Image: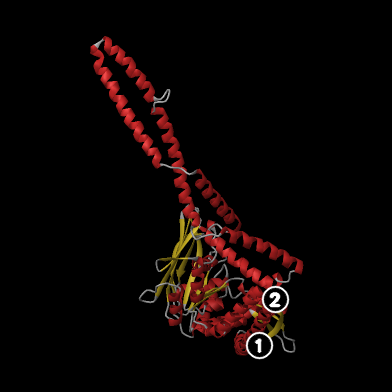
């Protein structure tokens, strides 16, 4: 059950913290006080929509935290199956933070996705929103109710129907693709054979492209190095205008100068040494050039092979492995086209078998649903009688769809008659808003008895009801609350009087700043709140007395006099 709610900087809420109790928790307050914000924050914490502007003005972030006590072994197992570690005491802390338009969700400190959060929330709480009873006007919702009531008994066959439906869908598409004309078939064969030949003639080898790239890089480098060395050899050689030739001519000039002045002999010796060094360098450079042999023809062959492989990559895949995979699909397609009639016959046979299997599974699903409906309908009818539908008749009708869908072959919907002698008709043709609210409450109460969800939340389930009917609704909520935690927002004193824990939500304005607050009422304040609900703006002693009597009747116990 839900132990604690903590909300900070969300909409009108500055910061609130609420400890919820066992059984029936009632929240009341003036219209616009922020009651629905409380329920909305719980829904948001469990993965519901949270608008980017939900953060309170002048705040950078909003935070919602829910603390649960999980006692059901089945729910604990479901939670742990989703990879979430339970606390030793069976508690579960869910938090959702909204920062700069982004939300971060955590469960017991571990970050989770919104989908994980929604799946978890579906196990922990059943939230009935303000307008959820309107969903009863849509017949497909009725089937969802039935399937939920049937529970895990229905799950295996539903999964088989879904799987068979997808298989039939794929086979039908393949069959449609296989209805080409003979001319189209021959054209496709010709095209595929061209692709087959092109790939086969390439004679590709695994990782060949990588090896060729390395060869090309090395050969391209060898050519460039050879060109650089050749140029250097010419620049330092003894051809005309080469460094060796110029230095040789310099030596001749210096020899003439030395013959006329012996003091210049050291300079002559230096240039002679330079000539010897340059001669050695030029000879070694020539030897190095012989090591960098370059074969232009081999490079062209590598380039040509790479161009071929890259061209195939553009057509059939970005790697040799992808090209070879595509080649296999070509052979498979050609095999089908060569033996086209045999392929079509086999495909038709597979489709007929799959459709027959789908029909059988859909019939099994339909039969299980009808058996479950025989158990569900009397329970809902009994709950309706307790909610002041005195002469109600209630049933569920089934119609077979023209085509089987992923959810089976059934169109199922509830029918009702609220007056003696009236023919039973679909809910959308009969029920008013108040009646829909009570019908939804009856359904929720029945479902609560069948599943393991420990907490139910009702946001204004009392829409459109009053008087004796309101009293009946309050009694029904109390019955549900005996085995479940119920949190309910209401405007009716008859319902509020039944509270095991009564909370008042009010809006305050301080320093031109509006905030919503919630507080747990003691017995005295609870009676005053009941008086406010029944008496309006002026609360007289008689109104307070009536409120006290209402509380006594609701609880069956005496309360202290004010």
Spot occupied by residue 163 in the image (x, y as percentages of width and height): 59, 78
Quadrant including the N terminus: bottom left
Image mark for residue 344 = 2
Q: Residue at x 39, y 73 (%)?
A: 85
Spot occupied by residue 434 in the image (x, y as percentages of width and height): 65, 77
Q: Is residue 10 left or right of residue 355?
A: left
Q: CA distance from mark 2 to mark 1?
A: 62 Å
Q: Secondary structure at mark 2?
A: helix
Image mark for residue 164 = none
Disc 2 residue crowd, few under 14, some 14–19, many 20+, Cα 10 Å: some
Spot occupied by residue 468 in the image (x, y as percentages of width and height): 61, 82
Q: Secondary structure at mark 1?
A: loop
Q: Residue at x 38, y 28 (%)?
A: 236
Quadrant including the C terminus: bottom left
Residue with the mark numbered 1: 390
**Who is closer to the viewer here, 153 or 373?**
153
Q: Quadrant of residue 186?
A: bottom right
* Residue 456 in sight from this viewpoint: yes
Q: Which one is in front in this view, the residue at disc 2 or the one at disc 1?
A: 2
Give the total of numbered labels. Answer: 2
Disc 1 residue crowd, few under 14, some 14–19, many 20+, Cα 10 Å: few
Spot occupied by residue 348 in the image (x, y as percentages of width and height): 69, 79
Q: Is residue 551 left or right of residue 421?
A: left
Q: Quadrant of residue 18?
A: bottom left
């Amino acid at each position: 059950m839900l132990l604690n709610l903590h909300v900070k900087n969300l909409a009108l809420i500055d910061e609130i913290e609420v400890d919820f109790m066992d059984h029936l928790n009632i929240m009341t307050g003036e219209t616009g006080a922020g009651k629905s914000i409380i329920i909305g924050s719980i829904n948001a914490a469990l993965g519901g929509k949270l608008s980017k502007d939900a953060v309170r003005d002048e705040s950078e972030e909003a935070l919602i935290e829910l603390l649960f006590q999980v006692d059901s072994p089945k729910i604990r197992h479901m939670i742990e199956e989703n990879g979430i570690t339970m606390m030793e005491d069976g508690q579960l802390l869910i938090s959702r933070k909204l920062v700069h338009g982004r939300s971060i969700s955590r469960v017991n400190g571990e970050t989770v996705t919104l989908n994980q959060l929604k799946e978890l929330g579906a196990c922990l709480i059943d939230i009935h929103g303000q307008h959820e009873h309107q969903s009863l006007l849509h017949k497909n919702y009725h089937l969802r109710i039935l399937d939920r009531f049937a529970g895990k008994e229905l799950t295996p066959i539903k999964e088989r129907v879904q799987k068979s439906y997808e298989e039939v869908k794929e086979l039908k598409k393949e069959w449609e693709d296989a209805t080409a004309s003979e001319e189209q078939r021959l054209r496709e064969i010709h095209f595929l054979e061209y692709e087959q030949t092109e790939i086969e003639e390439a004679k590709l080898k695994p990782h060949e492209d990588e090896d060729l790239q390395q060869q090309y890089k090395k050969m391209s480098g060898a050519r460039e190095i050879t060109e650089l060395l050749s140029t250097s050899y010419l620049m330092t050689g003894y051809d005309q205008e080469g460094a060796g030739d110029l230095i040789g001519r310099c030596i001749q000039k210096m020899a003439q100068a030395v013959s006329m002045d012996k003091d210049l002999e050291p300079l002559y010796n230096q240039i002679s040494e330079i000539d010897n060094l340059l001669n050695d360098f030029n000879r070694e450079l020539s030897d190095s050039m012989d090591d960098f042999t370059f074969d232009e023809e081999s490079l062209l062959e590598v380039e040509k092979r790479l161009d071929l492989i890259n061209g195939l990559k553009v057509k059939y895949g970005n790697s040799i492995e992808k090209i070879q995979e595509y080649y296999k699909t070509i052979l498979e397609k050609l095999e089908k086209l060569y033996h086209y009639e045999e392929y079509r016959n086999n495909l038709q046979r597979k489709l007929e078998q799959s459709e027959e299997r789908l029909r059988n599974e859909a019939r099994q699903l339909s039969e299980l649903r009808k058996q479950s409906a025989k158990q569900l309908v009397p329970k809902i009818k009994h709950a309706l009688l307790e909610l002041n539908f005195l002469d109600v008749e209630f049933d569920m009708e089934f119609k077979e769809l023209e085509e089987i869908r992923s959810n089976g072959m059934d169109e199922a919907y509830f029918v009702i008659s609220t007056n003696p002698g009236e023919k039973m008709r679909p809910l959308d043709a009969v029920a008013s808003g108040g009646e829909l609210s009570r019908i939804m409450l009856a359904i929720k109460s029945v479902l609560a008895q069948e599943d393991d969800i420990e907490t139910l939340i009702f946001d204004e389930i009392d829409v459109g009801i009053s008087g004796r009917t309101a009293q009946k609704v309050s009694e029904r909520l109390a019955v549900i609350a005996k085995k479940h935690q119920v949190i309910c927002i209401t405007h009716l004193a008859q319902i509020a009087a039944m509270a095991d824990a009564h909370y008042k939500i009010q809006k305050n304005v301080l320093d031109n700043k509006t905030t919503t607050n919630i507080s747990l009422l003691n017995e005295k304040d609870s009676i005053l709140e009941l008086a406010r609900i029944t008496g309006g703006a002026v609360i007289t002693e008689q109104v307070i007395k009536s409120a006290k009597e209402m509380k006594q009747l609701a609880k069956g116990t005496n309360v202290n006099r004010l």
